[in-house]
Image (spheres, helix red, strand yellow):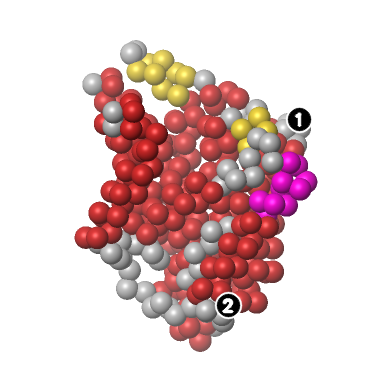
Amino acid sequence: MTILLQHVIDAVSVGGLFAMMALGIGLIFGIMRLINFAHGELVMIGGYAMWLVVAIPGPLVVLFSIAVVVALALGMERIAFRPLRQASPATLLISSFAVSYFLQNLVVMIIGSRPKPFTFAEGLTQNLQVGELRLPLLQLVTIALTIAVLAGITLFLKRTPMGVLMRAASQDFRMARLCGVRANMVIAAAFVMSALLAWAVSLVYAVQTGQLSPAMGLRPALIGFVATVIGGLGSLPGAAVGGFLVGVLTVLLQILLPPELRDFRDAFLFALVLVVLLFRPRGLLAVRAEMERV
């Protein structure tokens, strides 16, 4: 029973991390029909922003890094995506790749390509012993953060005027604009929420790995995209479900695979994802929203 509970906690914490990543990607796709592969660089920049000012008090580190990530997300939307809203989906996709590689190489030029040790919030790496159960504090914080994020997004989308506008825009942006919805305001709000989710992922992921690198956002972004596709593009509940499903599959493969095959865990993971999509090509929670972009 102790081993089972340990595996359940591992699966929920990993799934929570992937769910937050998938929600950040799904928010932008739901409104703009844009798969923003530069979302991983928001995670990377969040980690480096904390690393740059790690000597100042913790709350100020958090506020500074959040401000940097939000400002970067808004700048990304204003400079790279707003002028291309009427362009083809392929053009928008290429733009997101360009932003991603630009930010990676900018960090390499300014800070360097060598991994940097990440020492912020070292207390999260400690373990709590409850009887025979060993509970890593970081996993408990990840689960609590995921619950808070899911509850916050749900309340925001259902109980606030901006949330209602974002839901309307995700269903049919053209009709929403005809009804007076300001496109720039709604899209900017979506990028801000996406940036906050990216910052939360960057905190957990950087503490978990203990180091920062210019390419650290690639794997979370890829996993988040896969989780979004599994859940159903355009569906925020689907993105969360997809994230948790990928997390559970990751932990199960780590447990069930023989030691000599565990290095190929991701290959088996994507093979299972392919099987899921063969039976549910539109995702587990496909939406019927209009697919016109703004």
Task: From the viewer's perspective, tell me whether residue 131 is left or right of residue 147.
Answer: left
Q: Amino acid at mark 2?
A: Arg
Mark 1 / mark 2, whichever is N-terminal:
1
Disc marking residue 289:
none
Instruction: Name, please, the residue furthest toward the left.
Output: 279
Vertical order, 104 against 167 (above or below): above
The span picked out in magenta is 103-112
- For the image, the number of numbered tags is 2
The reply to whether the magenta stretch includes residue 105 is yes
The image quarter containing residue 212 is top right
- Report the quarter where the N terminus lies: top left
Q: Which residue is mark 1?
A: 55
Q: Which residue is mark 2?
A: 85
> Counting other residues with Cα less than 10 Å from the Cα at mark 2, is it few (<14), some (14-19), or many (20 or more)?
some
Q: CA distance from mark 1 to mark 2?
A: 41 Å
The residue lying toward the viewer, choosing from 123 and 267, is 267
Q: Secondary structure at mark 2?
A: loop
Instruction: Name, please, the residue furthest toward the bottom.
Output: 178
Instruction: Name, please, the residue furthest toward the top.
Output: 131
Q: Residue placed at 40% from the left, 66% from the top? A: 234
Task: From the viewer's perspective, tell me whether residue 75 is left or right of residue 229.
Answer: right
Vertical order, 130 against 179 (above or below): above
Is the C-beta separation of discs 1 and 2 under 8 Å? Answer: no
Locate residue 174, reporting x and y percent: 48, 83
